[in-house]
Amino acid sequence: MAKSKAAKEQTARQASKKHMKRFQDWEAVKPDDYYVRCASSFLHHPAFLALSPAARMTLIFMREKTAGNREFHFPLSSYAAFISRDGFQRAIKQLVALGFVEITGKNKNLRKCNDYRFSSAWTRWTPR
């Protein structure tokens, strides 16, 4: 029997927890919490620094939700707590323009969330 995508993500998180160092009390609320993987070169890249604060938060929450998967869905329930629908649309436009995310499927007519894929095009972005 094939595992669902959510079950695979949960299994990946549990497997990564086995090799994880526990967080200190000043780092997280829960000592066995999981982390969002972001390289230093990613955080200091001019493309990341050029993002608006809302786009940065959206990107970080996308990376958290995907647990290392390149292709993903990001429904309203994933972002409603930290950004409005209009704010999310502006953030997505910026993430696509700077090469962090690609929209692989527009599902508006199906009343489903869009399909996204992380991109490496941001690594070639230079400020104007």
Image (tube, rainbow, N blue to C red):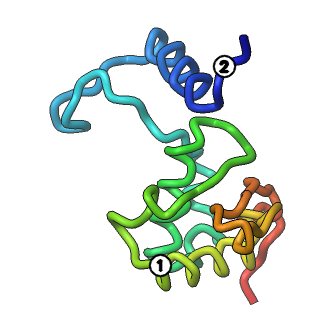
Residue 5 percent location from the top left of the image: 64, 31
Estimate how packed mark 2 is, as few (under 14), some (14 to 19) or many (20 or more) residues with alpha carbons within 10 Å: few
**For the view shown, which residue lies furthest in the bottom direction?**
128
55 displayed left or right of 70 = left
Residue 9 percent location from the top left of the image: 57, 28
Estimate how packed mark 1 is, as few (under 14), some (14 to 19) or many (20 or more) residues with alpha carbons within 10 Å: few
In front of the other: 112 or 121: 112
33 displayed left or right of 20 = left
Say which residue appears at 64% left-offset and 36% top-offset: 68
33 displayed left or right of 122 = left
Mark drawn on residue 85: 1
Q: Amino acid at mark 1?
A: Arg
In front of the other: 108 or 21: 108
In the image, residue 88 sits, relative to residue 67, either above or below, namely: below
Of the two numbered discs 1 and 2 on the same chain, state the one appearing first in sequence.
Answer: 2
Say which residue appears at 65% left-offset and 62% top-offset: 112
Residue 96 percent location from the top left of the image: 73, 73
